[in-house]
Image (cartoon, grey):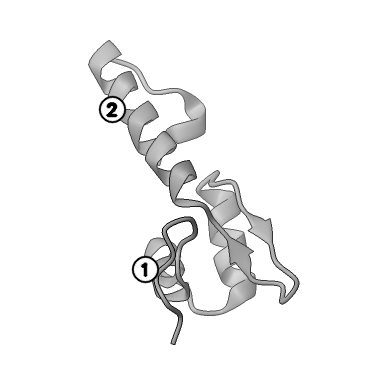
Amino acid sequence: MTEKSDLFLTDAELHELTGRKVLRLQIEQLRKMLIPFHGNALGRPVVTRATLIGIQQAKQDAAQKGSAPRVVNG
């Protein structure tokens, strides 16, 4: 079981975010969702919490302006 990190999403959170358990499919889904990530030495995708907070903030800002940039459309 993976402990919760303040910096990175856990395996369970990545599964919930992508809807995928298989690493290859998680990576594929992250790319489709335009969510930046890095691969660690084990080949697992690593997503920072700050990235997701930034994406959420960008969506909220765009909604207030009445448009959404292509990068954050979900």
Comparing 25 with 5, the one in front is 5
> Label 1 is placed on what type of residue?
Glu
SS of the residue at dot 1?
A: helix
Residue 37 at least partly seen: yes
Asked if marks 1 and 2 touch (Cβ < 8 Å), the reply is no
Residue farthest toward the right in the current orientation of the protein:
41
Query: Residue 13: where, in percent of width, then height?
Result: 39, 68
Query: Residue 65: where, in percent of width, then height?
Result: 29, 12
Q: Which quadrant is the N terminus positioned in?
A: bottom left
Q: Which mark is residue 16?
A: 1
- Residue at point 55% right, 67% down? 26
For residue 65, above or below residue 36: above
Pick whichever of labels 1 and 2 is earlier in the sequence: 1
Q: Which quadrant is the C terminus positioned in?
A: top left
- Residue at point 37% right, 68% down? 16
> Label 2 is placed on what type of residue?
Gln
SS of the residue at dot 2?
A: helix
Q: Is residue 68 left or right of residue 24?
A: left
Residue farthest toward the left in the current orientation of the protein:
64
Q: Quadrant of residue 10?
A: bottom left
Query: Residue 8: where, in percent of width, then height?
Result: 49, 59
Q: Which mark is residue 60?
A: 2
